[in-house]
Image (cartoon, grey):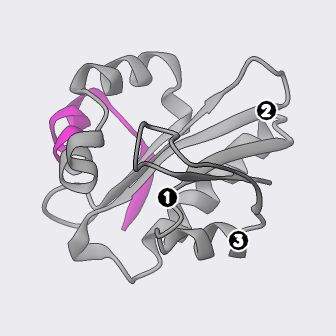
Amino acid sequence: MLIRSVNIQDMAGLYALECNAFGDHCFPDFFFRQALDMWPSLLLVAEPDAGALAGYVLAVPSDQADEAWILSLAVNADFRGQGLGRRLLADVLAILEAKGFTHIKLTVHPDNPARQLYADLGFREAGFEEAHFGQGEPRVLMVR
């Protein structure tokens, strides 16, 4: 499995992966095209030997010089449970650290099993918002 920076040829596959993973809460397709232009080294995809993209991770800088956010991490259902999410996250964290980011944040649904992955990679819970994306959409803030 190759993990690499996204390219323009990945746009359709990336958006399909996003829709499958997040349904009504997915980013629009044009957002990924803009992310390619703005943060190409922070948008990584996992490319299997054959077939559709297996996963992606997107990180972005914040207004604070030393702070970044993990905006999204998604793994195709066919590739879950194989450590791919961990690899994607570890790779983008290494890039962020090399760029000088010392504070990294993300939000996650309280029921999402990825909370344990984030904790394993050094994130700690730092807050909770009951309606982060509206009623019935709670999120836990995690920081590293």
- Kindly indicate whether the residue at mark 2 contacts the one at mark 1 (C-beta within 8 angstroms): no
Residue 8 drawn above or below residue 95: above
Element marked by disc 1: loop
Residue at image coords 44%, 56%: 3
SS under mark 3: helix
Q: On residue 67, which mark appears?
A: 2
The picture places residue 82, in percent across and down from the top left corner, at: 40, 82
On whether residue 113 falls in the magenta region, the answer is no
- Residue 52 locus on image (x, y percent): 16, 56
Q: Earlier in the sequence, mark 3 or mark 1?
A: 1
Give the number of the mark in front: 3 or 1: 1
Query: What crowding class fits label 2: few (fewer than 14 Cα within 10 Å), some (14-19), or many (20 or more)?
Result: some
Q: Does residue 46 appear to the left or right of 89 in the view shown?
A: left
Quadrant of residue 134 in the image? Answer: top left
Amino acid type at image mark 3: Ala
Position of the C terminus, as image quadrant, is: bottom right
Label 3: few (<14), some (14–19) or many (≥20) C-alpha neighbours in 10 Å? some
Residue beneath disc 3: 119
Label ID, residue 38: none
Is 12 inside the magenta-drawn segment?
A: yes
Residue 112 versus residue 133: which sits nearer the camera? 133
Magenta residues, as a range? 1-16
Q: Is residue 20 above or below residue 19?
A: below
* Res 120 → quadrant: bottom right
Give amino acid for label 1.
His
Residue 109 is tagged as 1
